[in-house]
Amino acid sequence: MLKVDGLYKSFGGVHAIQDVSFEVPKGVVYSVIGPNGAGKTTLFNLVTGIYTPSAGRVFFEDAEIGGVAPDELARRGMSRTFQNLQVCMNLSALDNVMIGGHLKLNSGILAAMLRWPGLSAADRKARARAAELLAFVGCERYIHADANQMPYGALKRLEIARALAADSKILLLDEPAAGLNHTETHEIEELIGKLAQSGLTVVLVEHDMKLVMAVSDQILVLDYGKRLAEGTPAEIQANPDVISAYLGGEIEGE
Amino acid sequence: MSGLAAAPTQAAETARSRWLGLAALMAFMAVLPLVLPNAFYYDVVIRICINAIIVLGLNLLIGYTGQISLGHAGFYGGGAYVSAILVEHYHVAPPLALIAAAVAIGATAWLVAGAILRLKGHYLAMATLGLGIIISIVITNESRFTGGPDGMSISDFSLFGLRVSGEKQWYWVFAGLLALAVVLAQNLIDSPAGRALQALHGSEIAARVSGIPAAKFKTRVFVLSAVVASVMGSLSAHYMGFITPGLAAFPHSVELVTMVVVGGMASIYGSLFGAALLTVLPQLLARFEGWETVIFGVILVGTMIFLPRGVVPSLAARLRRKEA
């Protein structure tokens, strides 16, 4: 479904991503982990068109997407959330979710001004669906709220609802549990489990190991922008390289 | 699950309050002539309507989409002069001249939009400011066509032999257009396209990953607001009968943006209020000879300190808080 081949990205002299390759099969939960600054979010931004790769290629459903604009990627069926929230605070919670369904609606400006037949009906349907999605992610309390009245944890889930509104083929979650307390993290874990069950392909970047180990089918470990290991949760937990990257390794030569 | 069922109800409620607002506006405009004593007052109200419609268009760009323009007087003046030149020098029928002007101004806006809407914040402000000033300079200097700083006169507007002249007739034209503009703007805001514009303001990156082509939407709303300004320019040229380059000048652009900000960003009735306030205030303050600019400034500064989101949205928010 998603394939990354020999990807590089440097910012000035900093090599954020060096020669990273991996493949995400359809219908799995694929996680990318690594210590702070390992390049996880950079990798995400490369895959989702926010950054252009310095070298290497990214394929989505066999089409190369390196450097393709985010709105075009959305059109092809990719949605994502953000580590540092990207929520429209000038809109209501429902409107935010409806933004995710943008591509399924008639978005002509003239058609909108003239109330083109069918436009209002489709919009009402989208609104009802957005309310369902808010309930699905556990934000039913906020169906009538404005985004700026919602707490941080709910906004994280609002972003997931927005991404789901697009009915896309792949969902990339950038640290969905960052900044959440224990209960909220557990709710996110359950939510990702529900998404996986529905057959959606999920790519996850996350720091919370308990969450990652619980939901992932495959895990990629990055360290200093390089691929350190890849495997199932059990394999990763047993991998000595991974343990030393996280806990600090022995000094060589001793 | 009661929330789920209530979501469409909420939408119906906003629809109802929208029609109520529009009905109130139309009723107000319908009875207003009964209390307007003479042509001078008609003229003031007409100027409010003209500004209100331009400001509605500009608010779509500034308040809803979050892009600044300091050059809209250029589009307004440009529309006025293209109409005047076509009608007076080339004897084009006024409605055709109006359409030609709108196409010309729209095309100009579209051509420059690609380049300048990539800019953000101060840079976009500077670029639109420059564009407005260029249009204003062209109008002042091409005196062979425009009469230069002396201005030029333009005949009455007529459509299929129907001639519009005098404040009383024009009043109904502009009042009707204002109601139409409010309906169209409300329709736009409450639609997928309108949401897309507001999403660009809220988080451009979120909008883009949701499939909203940012550049296209910004260009479209920029062109739309420019065309609205151009059409109002053409009509007000016919209404006033005589136009000067001051219409397109930078201070007028600032005045339009001030109407948006004082009335209320991202607010339809805020646009109307801002236009009314800033059109009437200078007239009211005229009696404080020599001090009018100072008082005008104090009122504006006071508004922005005490009602920072603009008069209408700030007051509406306060009202809602009291109810809750």
Image (cartoon, grey):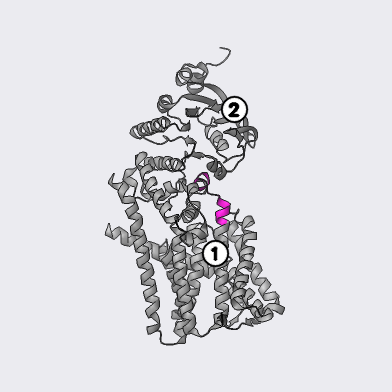
Residue A54 in which image quadrant: top right
Amino acid type indicated by mark 2:
Val
Task: Give x and y (percent) for residue B105.
Answer: 62, 67
Q: How many marks?
A: 2
B13 relative position to A5: left or right = left
Provide the major secondary structure of the magenta segment.
helix
Residue that badge 1 annotates? B225
Q: Residue at x 50, y 57 (%)?
A: B65
Secondary structure beneath disc 2?
Answer: strand
First to last magenta residue range: B206-218
Q: Which mark is residue A20?
A: 2
Secondary structure beneath disc 1?
Answer: helix
Task: Give x and y (percent) for residue A242.
Answer: 50, 20
Q: Is residue B213 magenta?
A: yes
Q: Residue at x 61, y 28 (%)?
A: A5
B308 relative position to A109: left or right = left
Res. B137 visible in picture: yes
